[in-house]
Image (cartoon, grey):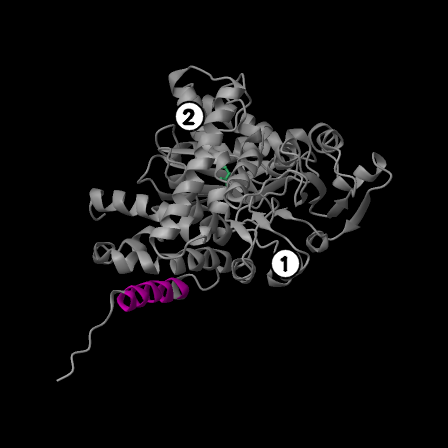
Amino acid sequence: MTITTVSNEQLAKEYVDGVFEQLKQQNCHQAEFLQAAEEIFISLVPVFAQHPEYIQANILSRIVEPDRIISFRVAWQDDNNQVQVNRGYRVQYSNVMGPYKGGLRFHPSVNESIIKFLGFEQIFKNALTGQPIGGGKGGSNFDPKGKSDSEIMRFCQAFMTELYRHIGPDVDVPAGDIGVGAREVGYLWGQYKRLTKANESGVLTGKTPGYGGSLARKEATGYGTVYFVNEMLKDANDSFEGKTVVVSGSGNVSTYAIEKAQQYGAKVVACSDSSGYIYDPEGLDLAAIKEIKEVKGDRISTYVNYRPNATFTEGCTGIWTIPCDIALPCATQNEINGESARTLISNGVKAIGEGANMPSDLEAINEFLNAGVLFGPAKAANAGGVAVSALEMAQDSSRVFWSFEEVDAKLHQIMKNIYMDSKAAAEKYGFPGNLVMGANIAGFIKVADGMLMEGVY
Ligand code: GLU
């Protein structure tokens, strides 16, 4: 008589595939959400093979379903007294590790799929920081481009008029993301105070320093990405010194990734915005970029007025054809596809650090991993922003504020820990060097263990 035994690996794979099939059926039009889920699910097969208790508690089906999705009308008046209507969202995904935490994105592409992909990733990213924060995300399809300052203010006030009833410093703490910076957070915060009469500054992060904000929050995501990549390079006996770097985007993440890479001795030759990219073979003039973006709020194409040898090219994907040693995608999701990845590899790229959320699609990630490129996935590499948001929450509740150096030193240590934890998890589960697997696994296990302790709900 032959006894067929089903291995733990097979059982784990069947379990993960089954949950994913169901997820596809229930969310068939949510491409970005399914993409983010698939990347994480694949990583978790070896975890379920070693932890049947997670299957027993059906952790995967539970963690992928948000605690709640709030969707609401945002009506506001533009400068011509026309009434405009947008849709607002807050997805409260998981509060196992702490209050729901994650940014707000104002961009015309925002829909439920985008907010769910961001919220789902945020659970694991936030767990990786080691700070007491759960996962959430929100936003609106409102387009800030071309809006006056008073339109932005009225929109933010209208948005908070609904959102305030769902959030709180120990409940859910929004912050910025694409289209939401210190100005927007300020308007949101003012309206929250008016509506609740409580001066709970820890209800939002990314506030201006001096008004409840933390020093180094603005720099945190970009600096954190470079700190993370620096750890990968150090492990490979390498460094930023003398390297040619391409950074996409020109918002907060990109600007401060450029700044830190330059401080580490790299030559950063390109960055971009939604209309195209600039290439400056002698190395970017960061002061010019800050003046264009932070002072004038202008397009990156105007950089050529500062530097005669620089060029501007329309369209965004061309930036990945520029030969570089290190690429830091800091713009938006799916900005590197398989083809761009192959171009980067054939041009000799050594390391990728994802400053944006999900900037490489699944094909691109596989290309990088198969080619042996050092790859720092978003959940780990861009966690510095939300990590300093958690430090802002701590400062707000203690009413004691730290110096720039203190916050930066804590950020640096957090990024080193995330690197070590991701590397160790990848090794433990049989995929040494694969930080995509490592980050997903290390983040997941923290949350899954918390879920086991809390029981079924
Ligand atoms: N939007 C950032 C992120 O994607 C920061 C979120 C926060 O600070 O809460 O992680």
Q: Crowdedness of circle 2 by 10 Å Cα count: few (<14), some, many (20+)?
A: many
Q: Position of residue 239 (x, y in %)?
A: 59, 40
Q: Is residue 201 left or right of residue 252?
A: left
Which of 402 and 111 lies nearest the eye of the viewer?
402
Residue 69 appears anywhere in the view = no
Residue 260 x, y percent position in the rendering: 61, 33
The amino acid type, in three-letter code, at marker 1 is: Ile
Label ID, residue 393: 2
Say how many tags the image has.
Answer: 2
Magenta stretch, main secondary structure class: helix
Secondary structure of the residue carrying numbered label 2: helix
* Separation of residues labelled 1 and 2 (CA atoms): 41 Å
Q: Nearer the viewer, residue 121 or 371?
A: 371
Is residue 292 in sight in this rendering?
yes
The amino acid marked with disc number 2 is Met
Label 1 SS: helix
The quarter of the displayed image where residue 283 is located: top right
Q: Which numbered disc, 1 or 2, marks the residue that appears first in the sequence?
A: 1
Q: Residues within 10 Å of mark 1 (few under 14, many from 20)?
A: many
**Rendered residue at 68%/49% (across/down):** 324
Identify residue for label 1: 345
Residue 88 image point, x, y percent: 50, 43
Residue 250 in the image, given as x and y percentages of width and height: 67, 39
Residue furthest left in the image: 1
Q: Is residue 428 above or below residue 198?
A: below
Query: As drawn, which residue projects farthest toward the front?
Result: 237
Q: Which residues are magenta?
A: 9-24
Residue visible at 55% across and 46% down? 354
